[in-house]
Amino acid sequence: MFYRRAGIRHTRYQDERQLFPLAFDRGLILTVLAVLLAAPILFDRLWLTGYLLPWLIWTSAALGLNLLMGWAGQIHLGYGAVMGIGAYTGVHLVRFGVPLEIAMIAGGIMSAGIGTVFGAAALRMKGIYLAMATLAMQFIVDFVISHNAAISGGTLATLQVPSVRFLGVPLTSDWATYYFALFVCFVITLFMLNVKRTSFGRALAALREKDYAAQILGVSTFRYKLMAFWVSSFIGGVVGTVLAVAYLRAVSPDQFHLELSIQILAMIIVGGLGSVLGPFFGTALILFAPIVLNNMLGSVAATFGLDLPIDMRAHLPLLAYGLLVIGFLLYEPLGLAKLYANFRNYMLVWPFRHAQR
Amino acid sequence: MDWMLIAELAVNGVFVGLMYALVSLGMVLIYKTSGIANLAQGAIAMTGGYVAWVLLAGLGAPVWLAIPGALVGMFGFGMLIERVALRRMIGQPVIMTIMLTLGIEIMLRGLLPGVFGASVKRLDIGIPQAPLFVADLLINRATLIGGGISLVLIVASLIFFNSRFGVVMRAVADDQTASWSVGIRVERAIAVAWGLGAVAATAAGILWGSTQGVDWSLSLLLIKALAIAILGGLDSIGGVLIAGVIVGVAESLATGVVDPLVGGGTRDIVAAVIILATLLFKPHGLFGREHIERV
């Protein structure tokens, strides 16, 4: 219908090698980008800071984890801790007077360093053993952050983020922080779109499918596993700083507990492992489904005069995450991105069911 | 250094460790037969605690009826999880099955406190709380009894593996395809392993629930159980017993000796440190079987 082609017919290799070979896709991407750029004018304040901003930040984080889990096939249950390391490093540097641009990179490097040390354990093991190692990392990092007064300022302390400037623009107004998050998300998305086409991305795919087979093909599993951990943790650290500066504005140890790791994990599973589009969908669903459900339950309870226990509503997000993760793993292991791809493939040749490729 | 205090911590640690080992036992049973690491084990223990609480306090059943009732019910629940969720995942990558059990963990942790309320429930199964003095050692009677029951159950499962069905389960653990071809019903063995795993978790959930109350924090037993399972080797039941004692004593000593030095909270990371150290130095644990990969 909207794609207006029965089958894919390219006449030049350049056409096929494009990131978005179809004209309709290019138009769609540009439209979405234009809407996102115009969002401060189009939407009111609640939508901008309450929904769009967290969506962009959490999507960036999910993209970073997806590089490790979707592309390289390495399980990481401690991504929240990685983000925490980045956030604390970044915030401390900013408080120290370091410009935000450098603090972000430093936060990323710090996360990458520590994340790789724990990931180095991955060189000896995989599967469940790796999951355990990263889970242990989550607890150890949590403990070190919250019990080290030099880092967190004490178990119950919060660390205020001072007003900062990014590329000369002070991040005080809503639109400035929004554009800052949008910029970071855009850069990470662009990187993720292109990483598939590099030798690095292909090596990670080989590693995911069978690591010793990849080794026989001449892919250094040692090197690429470490690199996957490095890059993914770097992104996690940078996003951690962005999260602290643009959204939380005050960091405390409990913001980076296991809950955050599980939330981001759920986002990429629901969205689709190993896809770039997936985290965008998954984040939207995981972030907003509990809110919508909660409001729906609230209004249903109000109309029927039911007395809904407050505990039920408080635990609804966890229940929703769990059900979504189970449901997607059982029925559509490749997530929402796969559902979208199915729809797109159907529409490509519509009204025909199949077309010659 | 107060040697009396250390002895006291060590003795109590042994019993606490045995109670942790009970959660771990189910994990090892499931891993041994099906090769799936069950990250929902802590949440199943929590579910068992809630079920026992509902039977005891909610329905007013006597203890001798409520506990067997909870155990039988949870046996069915474990088999149900395997039948509904895990059986569909045959042939999927390991990463998917781990995520699935984690999904079950998250769901249960949201469901039960949501339905029954998040406040701590008192589970009274008639274990006296008064401390016990042996010479000068002060021993927590609840953990002593709990540890004793755990020890009995772990030894019972060791004996069970020598029974006819236990041999069947060992065969499945050794080679699923080969056992299939000699007429062993592999699915049933795996389902029973899940059922028994849930029973072990429930027993632990009831014992812990009676000492610290039933609420969502019971699902944190997962971390201790993981530490024990990893340290003992994921497929060794004898390993669970010994690793349980080691983890319990280490945790108890850390709480008593290291806490005053660093300002508290070490109890939570002893398990994590043990997991990491085991994986770094002896990835297959003390008694686990090494997997050799050939191309």
Image (cartoon, coloured by chain):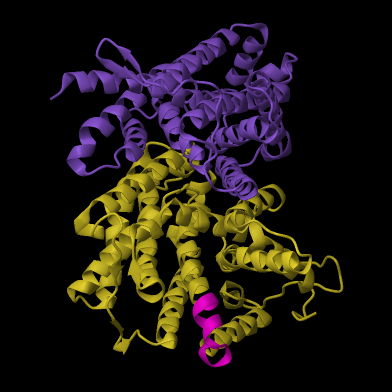
Chain colours: A yellow, B purple
From the image, give the main secondary structure of the stretch colored magenta: helix
Above/below status of A139 relative to A247: above
Name of the residue lying farthest toward the bottom: A41
Q: Answer whether residue B275 is visible to the viewer in this image.
A: yes
Q: Quadrant of the N terminus of chain B?
A: top left
Residue that appears at 21% across and 35% down: B258
Residue that appears at 67% across and 31% down: B55
Q: Answer whether residue B295 is visible to the viewer in this image.
A: no
Residue that appears at 39% across and 64% down: A235
User: What is the quadrant of residue A41 in the picture?
Assistant: bottom right
Query: Percent from the top left, x then y, of residue A224?
Result: 39, 51
Q: How many marks can you see?
A: 0
Image check: A37 left or right of A272? left
Q: From the viewer's side, name the closer residue of B282 and B134.
A: B134
In reply to whether residue A44 is colored magenta, the answer given is: yes
Q: From the viewer's side, name the closer residue of A115 and B255.
A: B255
In reply to whether residue A248 is colored magenta, the answer given is: no
Query: Percent from the top left, x then y, of residue A200?
Result: 43, 58
User: What is the quadrant of residue B165 in the picture?
Assistant: top right
Above/below status of A2 relative to B295: below
Q: Which residues are magenta?
A: A39-52
Image check: B201 left or right of B59? left
Residue that appears at 17% across and 19% down: B3
Q: From the viewer's side, name the closer residue of B211 and A350.
A: B211
Q: From the viewer's side, name the closer residue of A341 and B21.
A: B21
User: What is the quadrant of residue B79 in the picture?
Assistant: top right
Query: Percent from the top left, x then y, of residue A181?
Result: 43, 77
Name of the residue lying farthest toward the left: B1
Above/below status of B174 relative to A42: above
Query: Percent from the top left, x then y, of residue A316?
Result: 62, 57
Above/below status of B71 relative to A55: above
